[in-house]
Image (cartoon, helix red, strand yellow):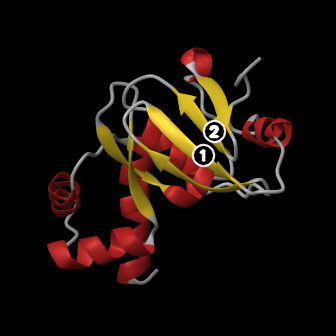
Amino acid sequence: MSNKKYRFQVIKDLIINQEISSQDELLKKLIDLDITITQATLSRDLRELKVSKVPNSSGQYIYRLTENTVPTATVTHNENMSLVFSQNMGVIKTKPGYANRIAFEIDNTYFTTILGTIAGDDTVLIIMKEESSREEVINELRRIIPNINK
């Protein structure tokens, strides 16, 4: 295995198995494992691995692999979520700190009815495609938010 492939595998393992909140923290863990790497190389590696920061259950932002999150995505903290519509927009209200994660999941899941999202702390604005109905949007969102508006 090449150095880069090995380094990528170690980075993935660390991110999957631990809650790492900064590049500095990740860099120290890699150095502890005798992997010599610069901050600039680590930044490039994270970008290439499609790593993003998402809130954990306590609202702290941690690294997660995008490619691992998207195919199996289900938003599990949806008991306090609501969705309301106005023309071709929808607004999801959720717990503080969760909106970015939800918007990320929506933007990275293929929905035929949604153009995109904008997230705040506890609010996600959904822009619907003109030809989409509210019912279609709700049905698609249930793929990742099973109990929305039930």
Q: Give the residue at mark 2.
A: 90
Horizontal side of residue 145 vs 76, given as left or right: right
Residues at circles 2 and 1 in contact by the CB criterion of under 8 Å = yes
Occupied quadrant, residue 54? top left
Q: Residue at x 27, y 72 (%)?
A: 43
Residue 80 or residue 87, whichever sits in front: 87
Sooner in the amino-acid sequence: mark 2 or mark 1? 2
Residue 7 in sight: no
Residue 134 in sight: yes
Query: Is the residue marked by circle 2 packed among few (<14), some (14-19), or many (20+) residues within 10 Å?
Result: many
Label 2 vs label 1: CA separation? 5 Å
Type of amino acid under label 2: Gly
Q: Give the residue at mark 1.
A: 126
Residue 8: percent from left, percent from top: 41, 70
The residue tagged with tag 2: helix, strand or loop? Answer: strand
Q: Residue at x 58, y 22 (%)?
A: 81
Q: Residue at x 55, y 23 (%)?
A: 77
The residue tagged with tag 1: helix, strand or loop? Answer: strand
Residue 86: percent from left, percent from top: 65, 37
Horizontal side of residue 64 vs 134, given as left or right: left
Horizontal side of residue 49 vs 136, given as left or right: left
Query: Is the residue marked by circle 1 packed among few (<14), some (14-19), or many (20+) residues within 10 Å?
Result: many
Type of amino acid under label 1: Ile
Q: Residue at x 48, y 42 (%)?
A: 101
Residue 61 or residue 30, whichever sits in front: 61
* Rendered position, 148 above or below 17: above
